[in-house]
Image (cartoon, rainbow, N blue to C red):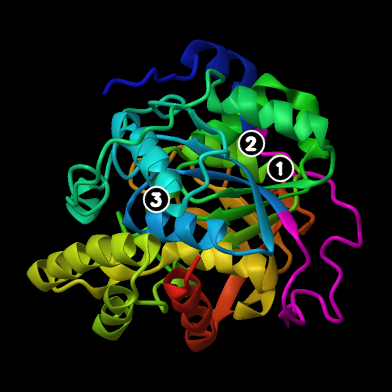
């Protein structure tokens, strides 16, 4: 079945954002947002969170499927909408995949919208080599009976956020094209978004290039817009997601449970384990996206540290790299030599713009994930 898909207006984006991308201005944050006992200290939240109202922006994706299942089976979360974006596979697959997964869980009332088919200014790069040609490990599920809403992803996000100022967290576990589109098309909306919970980035090297994590690599310009937005951010990146690897025992537990969610998850992840056997790359089964959702359910599953993170957009070999400063000074690349050597090298004030996950409790995570998927509805 063909779905209507939407691409960003690249010319408008370039015209309206070139100046801000070049400036890389640091956003201003309330002092309480990143307050810690010690500057840049590690900190964990004390325990399970209160109810979170979220919009889940996703590019399903095998681990996205697990994240959707976890979110929709967790009473701590109220999923207001699911928005699809191109990433792991093109939007022509991620949108129908999202519909199928929502239907499997049994929540047809949740609106699902299609978003950006392409990055803001770049060609689309996908990861079918990890997720299979259809995004779900090659596993075929029946076409969903539910349909996407008429609104685009950015329209749906804007409507929900503006109707509920300060109440909506956007959990974005794919490339950030949809979110950047919202921020660029509605500049006043940033102050109305409660927070971003992002799966993306890394402070210790990438997974698609030596520098960049996949989601930020696919659309670095969109990531720059999001990290410069001033919205509170929790970044759950490869530093922790590569430590939560799905094992044979987990898949066997999913297979043994007799409910539609566990059976679907088991089929997807069994196929993915088969892919691991061929590549000998254990990170193929890293639970990137479910860990991001789990951190909303029980923040103590990860340990956070305050950082100023900026996204590289101009590097030929490093586009999408997330560069993190944990303390002052904040230095950028030296200016080009114009013959005047008297000017000082610019140094910026250190102002954290996000909390980065630097530690994880894998046992606590899997003790949350697997029972949620295997429990009877």
Query: Which residue has dot 3 on it?
Result: 104
Query: Which residue has dot 1 on it?
Result: 343
Residue placed farthest to the right in the image? 31
Q: Sequence order check: which comes first, mark 2 or mark 3? A: 3
Q: Where's residue 352, x and y in %?
A: 75, 59
Residue 303 in view of the camera:
yes
User: What distance separates the C-alpha of mark 1 from that of mark 2?
Assistant: 7 Å
Residue at the image position 60 percent from the left and 64 percent from the top: 74
- Do callouts 1 and 2 mark residues in contact (Cβ within 8 Å)? yes
Placement of 364 over or under 27, stated as above or below: below
**Residue toward you, 80 or 130:** 80
Q: Quadrant of residue 119?
A: top left
Q: Main secondary structure of the magenta part?
A: loop
Q: Where's residue 101, x and y in %?
A: 39, 48
Residue count near mark 3 (Cα–Cα under 10 Å), binned few <14, some 14–19, many ≥20: many
Element assignment for label 1: loop
Q: Where's residue 6, x and y in %?
A: 44, 19
Residue 340, disc: 2
Q: Quadrant of the N terminus?
A: top left
Residue 205 counted in the magenta span: no
Residue at the image position 55 percent from the left and 56 percent from the top: 72
Residue count near mark 1 (Cα–Cα under 10 Å), binned few <14, some 14–19, many ≥20: few
**Residue toward you, 183 or 253:** 253
**Exactly how many numbered labels are in the figure?**
3
**Residue toward you, 239 or 104:** 104
- The span shown in magenta is 23-52
């Amino acid at each position: 079945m063909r779905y209507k898909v939407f691409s960003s207006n690249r010319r408008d984006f370039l015209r309206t954002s070139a100046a801000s991308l070049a400036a890389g201005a640091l956003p201003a944050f309330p002092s309480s947002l990143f307050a810690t006992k010690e500057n840049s200290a590690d900190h964990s939240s004390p325990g399970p969170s209160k109810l979170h109202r979220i919009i889940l922006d996703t590019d399903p994706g095998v681990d996205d499927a697990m994240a959707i299942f976890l979110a929709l089976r967790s009473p701590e979360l109220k999923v207001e909408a699911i928005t699809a974006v191109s990433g792991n596979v093109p939007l022509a697959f991620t949108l129908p995949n999202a519909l199928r997964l929502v239907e499997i869980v049994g929540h047809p009332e949740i609106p699902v919208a299609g978003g950006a088919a392409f990055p803001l200014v770049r060609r689309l790069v996908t990861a079918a080599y990890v997720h299979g040609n259809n995004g779900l490990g090659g596993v075929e599920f029946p076409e969903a009976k539910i349909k996407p809403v008429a609104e685009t992803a950015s329209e749906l996000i804007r409507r929900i956020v503006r109707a509920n100022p300060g109440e909506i967290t956007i959990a974005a576990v794919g490339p950030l094209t949809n979110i950047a589109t919202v921020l660029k098309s509605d500049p006043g909306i940033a102050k109305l978004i409660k927070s971003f919970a992002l799966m993306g980035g890394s402070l210790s090297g990438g997974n698609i290039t030596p520098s960049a994590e996949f989601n930020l690599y696919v659309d670095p310009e969109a990531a720059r817009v999001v990290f410069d937005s001033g919205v509170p951010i929790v970044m759950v990146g490869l530093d922790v997601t590569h430590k939560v690897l799905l094992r044979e025992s987990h898949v066997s537990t999913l297979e043994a449970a007799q409910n539609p969610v566990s059976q679907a998850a088991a089929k997807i992840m069994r196929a993915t384990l088969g892919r691991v056997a061929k590549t000998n790359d254990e990170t193929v089964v890293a639970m990137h996206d479910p860990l991001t959702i789990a951190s909303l359910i029980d923040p103590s599953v990860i340990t956070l540290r305050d950082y100023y993170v900026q996204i590289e957009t101009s590097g030929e070999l490093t586009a999408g790299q997330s560069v993190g400063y944990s303390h002052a000074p904040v230095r950028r690349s030296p200016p080009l030599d114009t013959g005047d050597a008297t000017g000082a090298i610019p140094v910026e004030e250190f102002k954290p713009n996000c909390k980065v996950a630097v530690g994880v409790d894998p046992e606590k995570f899997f003790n949350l994930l697997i029972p949620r998927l295997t429990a009877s509805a």
